[in-house]
Image: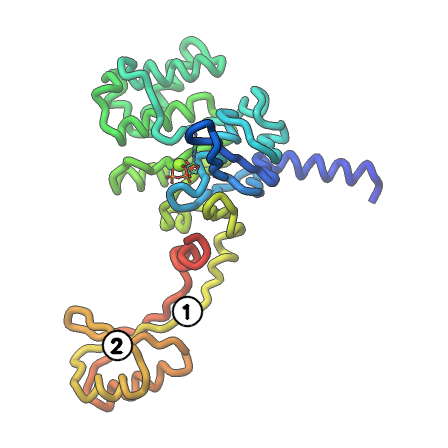
Amino acid sequence: MTAGSEDANENADRRDKLIEVKSLNKTFSVGLFKKRRVEAVKGVSFDVRRGEIFGFLGPNGAGKTTTIKMLTGLIEPTSGDAFLFGKRVPSAESRRDVGFLPENPYVYPYLTPREFVEMCGNLSGMRGASLRSRTLEVLTKVGIAYAADRQVRRLSKGMLQRTGLAAALVSDPQMLILDEPMSGLDPVGRKEVRDLIFAERELGRTIFFSTHILSDVEAMCDRVTILRQGEAVVSGEIRQLLRGEVLRTDVFLADVTPEATAALEAAGFTLNERPGLVVVEVESALRVEEVLKLALAHGSHIVEVAPRKETLEDLFMRRAL
Ligand SMILES: Nc1ncnc2c1ncn2[C@@H]1O[C@H](COP(=O)(O)OP(=O)(O)OP(=O)(O)O)[C@@H](O)[C@H]1O
Ligand SMILES: [Mg+2]
């Protein structure tokens, strides 16, 4: 390969990485005389590729919002590098094609969703009839068109969140950066926003969102980075991370006699009572048959044999807490 083609490959790689974060650090100085230091983000690296839905997961205080604020230029990194579309942050050109939903979006209370979204479109250079029709289109998309002309101070938390999402979408950006997009939404609202994110990806948008809700990441994301106390502890493809290894098998039994309980416990199994059922946790797949034989021999009935695969929750509990 010639040096020229290597350069071309590197450039193509760069173009494909819409977010590139390298050893990013943020230390806040707090307290009296700013003497106490909070290391909010410690050496975090990851990248987000074109067309992905990427989850940025971590418990409260893990450093998600701080990282997002650095990406969107609201605060400066203490050290490290970050690029959006290959352009170093913070810079106006890095943000040009990004729609951003901040955590707890603030909207001036006397504006209406329509006025706020139009104002955001206006700031992105949109004008006239096309701005008005795009505003209505995104308000409809996020399910808030019915309250388009109600003052924001009269909106519920979920309605405000939807208004913020509409504002992130109005300029038709290539990438969305969403800080907790599902927060404040009821179960139907969460499902709607999930579907919206899928639909936006189908339209070619790349979506990077933070959350502390595992099931959202598991259901939606191609890749994930899990943060813990400012550090990236897990990064990778969801499918690879959850390879489907069986952790244990749960055997659900009914009509469990005292003899059956005694026999299973004597064989060293753990039994858990559930309403009308007993669940036997079998750590080794090789011993499932033994449980079934013992249970049947003592008059119990087998209700279900359920292999438990590792979920993102298991991974999270193991690595993020
Ligand atoms: N401006 C600030 N000054 C001092 N400390 C800060 C500041 N902003 C954030 N922190 C601290 O940095 C750490 C990370 O906070 P951050 O808001 O990034 O967490 P998060 O992962 O977004 O949490 P959550 O899920 O609760 O939104 C916390 O310990 C927080 O107290
Ligand atoms: Mg946050």
Mark 1 residue element = strand
Q: Position of residue 182 (x, y in %)?
A: 34, 38
For marks 1 and 2, the one nearer the N-term is 1
Residue furthest out toward the right: 2
Residue 202 visible in the shown view: no
Work out whether 277 lies above or below 94: below
Mark 2 residue element = strand
Q: Is residue 286 left or right of residue 250?
A: right
Picture mark count: 2
Q: Is residue 221 left or right of residue 252?
A: right
Amino acid type at mark 2: Leu
Q: Position of residue 208 (x, y in %)?
A: 48, 37
The foreground one among 133 and 162 is 162
Q: Residue at x 35, y 84 (%)?
A: 289
Q: Position of residue 116 (x, y in %)?
A: 35, 16
Q: Is residue 51 left or right of residue 256?
A: right
Tell me: is circle 2 under 8 Å from ligand 1.
no
Residue 140 visible in the shown view: yes
The foreground one among 66 and 149 is 66
Q: Residue at x 42, y 22 (%)?
A: 170
**3D distance between C-alphas at marks 1 and 2:** 17 Å
Amino acid type at mark 1: Leu
Residue furthest out toward the bottom: 297
Q: Residue at x 38, y 56 (%)?
A: 313
Q: Which residue is mark 2?
A: 271
Q: Position of residue 22 (x, y in %)?
A: 61, 39
Q: Tell me where residue 167 sits by quadrant.
A: top left
Work out whether 292 lies above or below 183: below
Local crowd size for mark 2, using a 10 Å CA cut-off: few (<14), some (14–19), many (≥20):
some
Q: Tell me where residue 291 sits by quadrant.
A: bottom left
